[in-house]
Amino acid sequence: MACIMMELWWKLSVCFFCYQVVSGRVKREGHYVAAVYEHQSILSPNPTALVDRQSALELMGRNLDIYEQQVAAAAGQGAQIIVFPEDGIHGFNFTRRSIYPYLDLVLHLHSVKWNPCREPYLFNDTEVLQRLSCMALKNKIFLVANLGTKQPCEHIDPHCPSDGRYQFNTNVVFNDYGMLVATYRKSNLYFEYAFDAPPEADYILFDTPFAGKFGMFTCFDILFFEPAVNLVRQYNVKQVVYPTAWMNQLPLLSAVEFQQAFATAFNINILAANIHHPTLGMTGSGIYTPLKSFIYHNMESYGGKLIVAEIPVITPDYKTNLESNKIFRENLYHSYTMFTSTSMDDQVCYKEGQEALCRVSEKGNEESSPIFYAEMMYDNFTFVPVQENKGELKVCANTLCCYLNYQRAVLTDELYALGVFDGLHTVHGTYYVQACALVKCGGLCFSTCGQEVTDATALIDFQLWANMSTPYIFPLLLTSGITLDFADHMGWKNNHYFISKNRTSSGLLTAALYGRWYEKD
Ligand SMILES: *[C@@H]1O[C@H](CO)[C@@H](O)[C@H](O)[C@H]1NC(C)=O
Ligand SMILES: *[C@@H]1O[C@H](CO)[C@@H](O)[C@H](O)[C@H]1NC(C)=O
Ligand SMILES: *[C@@H]1O[C@H](CO)[C@@H](O)[C@H](O)[C@H]1NC(C)=O
Ligand SMILES: *[C@@H]1O[C@H](CO)[C@@H](O)[C@H](O)[C@H]1NC(C)=O
Ligand SMILES: *[C@@H]1O[C@H](CO)[C@@H](O)[C@H](O)[C@H]1NC(C)=O
């Protein structure tokens, strides 16, 4: 983390003496109150069936009833903006035809100033927009929601689909008068056959009186340069609203883990709202600042969750971590050596009971090298085990070398490994990843490294660094029970990116540098 600057900024911005009273609630100067709602969407029992508009509105109306309660609850706690998740109103798993009755008409014209609550007669098929607009107006709050939209097109338009209309996965923003102030069409669709990507990516900003401009994008967009990263960089965006319907994937891509990593990488605030659907692995919402997160992750129980937090406005002159590579004064320990230990023959498993089972699959490694391969997130990672109470490790793959300096603070018999991957990820999306990761393995066999694990008790003090080829590095620090921690230090030093942490607040699950090398996608 850009520690020196961050601490200074935090102290400056936490100004305890200048209070002001806004809508019955005391607010600190330079702060605003944000809300996100993790919504358990009421889903169509048969999303591929063709229904009429009336039935579609009925189903969406049940979700909007819940939105209405939550907007009132958030406003009652002083929230100035509320964000709802992707697919929250209509659900998912539609076909292109079956979603049609669920779509509102939205013309993506930048110049239209329209208040759907006050001028409902201007356009047909805008019932959802009207309800959302009225919620914003009635509760005097900025409201961000995601819905399906349609836009007729002519066949002279070369991108116009053969059925004569675009169908977009769209975020809409209403200001506190209910005015529709911004629409954003998702670019990076995640196998959403019901929707079209816009011919050109939208760069969407909207202005607020309480925190200046916000940027926005949706779900899978967060992993790509266009438009998410480019928007944040080009327009110097410091606040982002982010509706998502994210299926968690450990150890590197659980929702809260990556949302926080994006906020810390760019030193921005993110208001992220996810769907709540544990059986599909969907949960994980939060309000993130570069230094503190307010998160919700719950795989155990059903129901929605409103998060409200007062957070500082980040001003545009504030540097991002990606840019600030000179302010780190860490004395990185550079005397690392290639890890070569004793023969692995007797070390494949730590516990005797499992030895036979694991040996069969792993005996092939007759060399004394401790390096082994295991699949993590569908990628072939190169690993070395973390076997001592303290030490230094190095593991390389392709052009990327990953280094670890560690000391176990709480000794347990859990197996950890240091893994590296430098290559094109091709399952559930195609994108180039450079990752250097310290992970807790699923069991005591090497083959379990890379598996999804949710609990840990070991505390490990570490410095982790790698010679990344991309400046786009998302630092992950995930702890037991899918909780988050913040690194003590992070940044560039001698052409290596590093993070370090002593004493995580609970057991260590994942500490990683997740790099995206967009040019190689
Ligand atoms: C939606 O589709 C996914 C994958 O095709 C499937 O696993 C899931 O059960 C479906 N969900 C619903 C609610 O139909
Ligand atoms: C809305 O639909 C009605 C009935 O189909 C039609 O008569 C009317 O012209 C439409 N209004 C607009 C603004 O398109
Ligand atoms: C993983 O990569 C290593 C080194 O390139 C290779 O030897 C091994 O066969 C790969 N494993 C799989 C499952 O592809
Ligand atoms: C990373 O370091 C390794 C080992 O020194 C080296 O072989 C590799 O070329 C380096 N990669 C880059 C991109 O500099
Ligand atoms: C972190 O721990 C390492 C050893 O585990 C120690 O050398 C270092 O001084 C500690 N750093 C801080 C900031 O406490």
Image (spheres, rainbow, N blue to C red):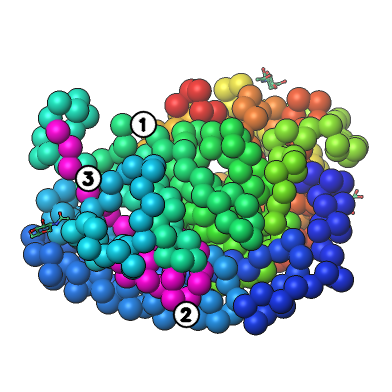
How far apart are labels 2 and 1 at the CA level?
36 Å
Assign a secondary structure to mark 3: strand
Assign a secondary structure to mark 2: helix
Closer-to-camera residue (249/209): 209
First along the sequence among labels 2 and 3: 2
Q: Please state the horizontal and vertical placement of residue 116, each as a whole percent of the image.
A: 32, 63
Residue 261 shows in the view? no
Closer-to-camera residue (73/351): 73
In the figure, residue 399 lies in which quadrant?
Answer: top right
Q: Tell me the tag on residue 151.
A: 3
Residue that appears at 12% across and 39% down: 164
Q: Assess mark 2: CB under 8 A from ligand 1? A: no
In the rendered structure, the answer to whether residue 56 lies left or right of residue 473 reads: left
Disc 2 marks which residue? 72
Closer-to-camera residue (386/121): 121
Closer-to-camera residue (329/69): 69
First along the sequence among labels 2 and 1: 2
